[in-house]
Image (spheres, helix red, strand yellow):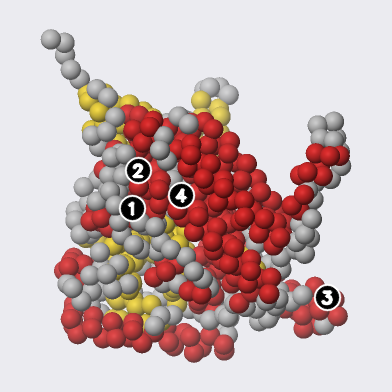
Amino acid sequence: MSDYYQQLADRVQQRFGTQITATHVAFSELTVELPREQLLDVCSALRDEDDFAFEQLIDLCGVDYLEYGNGRWQGARFAVVYHLLSIKHNHRIRLRTFAEEALPVVDSVITLWNSADWYEREAFDLFGIVFDGHPDLRRILTDYGFIGHPFRKDFPLSGNVEMIYDEEQKRVVYRPVTVEPRTLVPRVIRDDHRYQHAAIEGGE
Amino acid sequence: MSEIRNYTLNFGPQHPAAHGVLRLVLEMDGEIIERADPHIGLLHRATEKLAESKHYIQSLPYMDRLDYVSMMCNEHAYVMTIEKMLGLQVPVRAQYIRVMFDEITRVLNHLMWLGAHALDVGAMTVFLYAFREREDLMDCYEAVSGARLHAAYYRPGGVYRDLPAQMPKFKGASKWHDESEIAALNENRQGSLLDFIEDFTNRFPGYIDEYETLLTDNRIWKQRLVNIGIMSPERALQMGLTGPMLRGSGIAWDLRKKQPYAVYDQLDFDIPIGTNGDSYDRYLVRIEELRQSNRLIRQCVDWLRQNPGPVIAADHKVTPPPRTEMKEGMESLIHHFKLASEGFSLPAGEAYAAVEHPKGEFGIYMVSDGANKPYRMKIRAPGFAHLASLNEMVRGHMLADVVAVIGTQDIVFGEIDR
C-alpha cells in the first residue's frame, strides 16, 4: 500500500511540479503541501483529472501550529487540511495549505465540493480562518454571540466567560470565568529512540 | 384575493422529532419548504480541544460520547489511528472481538434508528420492538465492559479484557417477578457470552422479519418515504455523504470491503445498495445491513469459540501489564505507573484512520508532535456532512417530510456537535 502511495506521490509531483511545495508519504498516507495561491487550481485538477478523480471532500479542518513541538515550529501559524477520497480509484490524499497569523485567508473550495460549506464554517468558527468566496461564512458550533476562536492554542481550555442566572436581572448573563486552569498530566515530549525511524519516514 | 406571505418557522431545539438539540429555521411557502437552515452546536463540548489536554488513553471514553448510539465503533476509529502511528500489531483474537462488537454496535445503532424513524413517521410499535432487542445487546456490552452504553472497552493494542466465560444472570425473585419468570429470563444466559450472542443471532432474523412485516409493505410507511429526500449519486458524492446514505443512492462503497480494516477481509458479507436514493431505499439498505451484521456476528462467534489467545498486545510501553505481574515484577510496576501517570507518546507526524461506522465514514485525524497528548485531533463525523445536505434534501417537500428526512439521515447530535 505504501508503494502505491509513493507512486501516487510521484504522479502528483510530476503533474503539478512547482505548484506544490512538498509531498510526504507516511503511514501509507500521502500528504501534499501547497501554497494557498495554487489551491483552487490543484484542487480542481485533482477532482476532474481521470488519473486522480477525487470526487469527495471527506474532511476539512484547521490546525493551529502555535505551540507545535513546544515552539519548534517554523513557518505560518495556521494550516487548513483537506482529506480527499476517490471512490473510483479507492485512494486518498491529504492537502495542507498554510495561512499567516495576521489575516488567515484561504480560498474556499465550496464550488468544487459542496460539502466544504459546513467544514469551512467550522474552521472559521474554531480557528478564525477566513475562506474567500464562501457565500455564508457564519459561526456554526459555538454559541450565538460568541467572542473568540476557541480552538486556537492561545484560547484557554476553560474559556473566557461563563454563564450564570442573575437573580436581580432575572435572566442569564455572562461573567468572566471563575474556573482556575489546571494541568493534571503535564505535556512532555520525549526523545524516544523507537520513534526516530518513524519520524524520519514522516518527514518531520 | 388574500395576501400570500412566506413564513419562517422555528423547529426545535426542543422538539421530539429533532433527535436531540437540532434547531431548524425553515422558510416556508405555505406548507412547502423553501429553505432549511439547521443551527447546530447546542451540544458542542469541544471534545477535540479537551483531547489536546489529556493523554491518549484518557481521551478514549470521550469517543463513546460522540455518537452515543454506536459507541464501540467510535472507539475503534480512535484506537486504529493510534495503532497506525505506533505501528502496533493487534492480536487476531482482539480483532475478531472488535469486529463482533462493531457489528453488535451496528445492530444497536440501526435498531435505534429504525425505532426513532418509525416513531417520527407515526408507527409506534416498531420502537418498542427495537428496544426489546437492544436490551439483549446492551447486556452484551455490560458483560464485557461493565457499562451498558459508554463501554470504553477498546484499547490501543487490543481490547480491555477477554470475553467472560459466564453470561451474567438475573437474580432474585421480587414482587414483580417470581422464580419461574426469573428462570425464563435466564434461560439463554446459562452458558458463556458467546452462547448468548449465538442464541441472539439465531433469533434475530425472525425479529427483522417482524419489523419488515410492520413496515416494508405498509402503505402509510411507503407513502411517507418513497420519493422523499432523493439524492442522486452525483449530488451524494458532492455533499460528502457516506455510509447507508451513499449506498442508498446506488454507490457500492463500504470501507469494510474497499479499505478493509481489522479482519473484515476474512469474513463473508454483502453490501446492499439502493437504486432511487430516496428515504425508502435507505430504509431497505439499513434493514439488509442488519441481516448482514447478523451474519458477521455469527462468523465471529464461531471463530472466537475455536481460537483462544491474547486479546491485547504485549507491548507494555503502550498496554498495561497484567495485574498479577504488576504485583511481583518491578518493571511491570514501572510500566503501569508510567502509563497511568504520563501515558505513552506517539511519534511526531500525522495520520488519518477511518472505519465504516453505522452512519458512514467515521475518521480520526491525529496530529502529533511527539508528546504524550495529541497536538490536534479532528473527528470526521459522518452526520455532520449528512445534516449539511438537509437543506437540499427537504427543499420543495412538506413540513412533515422534514421529520422523515431527519429520520432517514440517522442524526445523532453527539457526533455532529462534538
Q: Can residue A167 be seen in this view?
A: yes
Q: Distance between the residues labelled 1 and 3?
A: 53 Å
User: Disc 4 marks which amino acid?
Assistant: Ile
Marks 1 and 2, Cα distance to the nearest angstrom?
10 Å
Q: First in sequence: mark 2 or mark 4? A: 2
Instruction: Name the residue that disc number 1 marks.
Output: B274
Would residue B199 appear left or right of B327 to someone viewing this image?
A: left
Q: Which sits earlier in the primary sequence, circle 4 or circle 1?
A: 1
Q: Disc 2 or disc 4, which is closer to the eye?
A: 4
Residue visible at 58% across and 57% down in the picture: B104
Residue B239 shows in this picture: no
Query: How many neighbours does mark 3 have within 10 angstroms: few (below 14), some (14-19), or many (20 or more)?
Result: few
Q: Mark 2 lies on which chain?
A: B
Residue drawn at 31 percent across, 45 percent down: B278
Q: Upstream in the sequence, badge 1 or badge 3?
A: 1
Q: Where is residue B381 in the image (x, y as percent from the top left)?
A: 43, 55
What amino acid is labelled 1 in the image?
Gly
Disc assigned to residue B287: 4
Determine whether B307 is above or below B168 in the image.
Answer: below
Instruction: Please name which of the two marks, 4 or 3, marks the residue nearer to the observer.
Output: 4
Q: How far apart are marks 4 and 3 (CA)?
A: 46 Å
Residue toward you, B216 or A136:
B216
Q: Which of A122 and B128 is in front in this view?
A: B128
| Label 2 environment density (alpha carbons within 10 Å; few <14, some 14–19, many ≥20) | many
The x, y position of residue A137, in whole percent, is 27, 47
Mark 4 burial class by Cα count in 10 Å: few <14, some 14-19, many 20+: many
Identify the chain of the residue marked 4, using the numbered disc in the image. B
Which residue type does callout 3 highlight? Thr
